[in-house]
Image (spheres, helix red, strand yellow):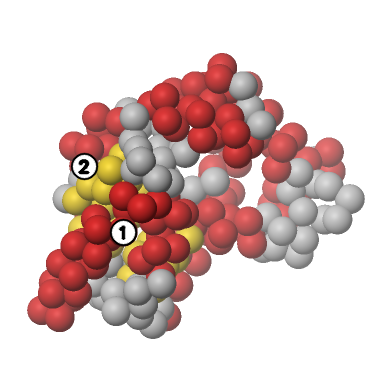
Amino acid sequence: MSPLSPSDAKPSTPFTVGLTGGIGSGKTTVADLFAERGVAVVDTDLIAHQLTAPNGIAIAAIRAEFGDAFIDTGGAMDRKKMREYVFSDPLAKQRLEAILHPLIGTETARAIAQANGHYVMPVIPLLVESGKWQQRFTRILVIDCDEQTQIQRVMQRNAMNETQVRAIMAAQATRQQRLEAADDVIVNNAGVDALAPQIERLHAFYMSLAACH
């Protein structure tokens, strides 16, 4: 899960490019390609996994709020059970977000401050939905693709049916909302080979801006 609010996070001073996109748009692939070029990538999904892993700092609060049924035998949050629960109950989703989002915001801010690279690229799936993360980054980069491509990718990757994928998409910002929030856009309809020239162009652009930041 990704934060709706940066909470206690302080504004970052490095040159930062907030990367976002809908489910199945290819955020991880693009972030990995930027990382290969020396960019410091901060993955908020990874931070969320760490918080909800065995002995993660969110586990005690999740157990207290939702009960042992949502903690698996290894001591981590049962992500599948929790995902099904919060999708069926908006209030449960808000309760979980109230636990996770402040923690994710704090850990993201710490990671940005400690990052070492040409510039910093936080990956925040719900960046546009938050309404608060946007002003904290120098640029917003949106990974865009057509909706049918999104659906096919997620169905293949996560073994979901189309109805399930569309339900997730419906809970996210629309494609148009993300594009309106973007300073820069990478189109990811055609696979990795089509990404390289777009990434090279933007990386050179960001390097020039970071040098003046």
- Secondary structure under badge 1? helix
The answer to which quarter of the image holds residue 60 is bottom right
| Residue closest to the far front | 193
> Could you tell me residue 169's position as x and y percent?
45, 27
Look at mark 2 in the image and give the residue it sits on: 181
Q: Position of residue 203 (x, y in %)?
A: 23, 67
Q: Residues within 10 Å of mark 2 (few under 14, many from 20)?
A: some
> Is 2 on the left-hand or right-hand side of 40?
right
Residue under the point 39% across and 64% down: 33
SS of the residue at dot 2?
helix
Height in image: 36 above or below 196?
below
Mark nearer the viewer, 1 or 2: 1
* Viewer-closest of 76 and 194: 194
Amino acid type at mark 1: Ala
The residue lying toward the viewer, choosing from 153 and 14, is 153
| Displayed quadrant of residue 35 | bottom left
Q: Quick one: label 1 or label 2, which is nearer the N terminus?
A: 2
Residue for point 40% across, 52% down:
192
Residue 40, quarter of the rendered image: bottom left
Distance from the alpha carbon under mark 1 to that under mark 2? 23 Å
Query: What percent of the width, then of the height, locates residue 15?
Result: 23, 72
Q: Which mark is residue 196?
A: 1
The answer to whether residue 152 of the structure is visible from this angle is yes
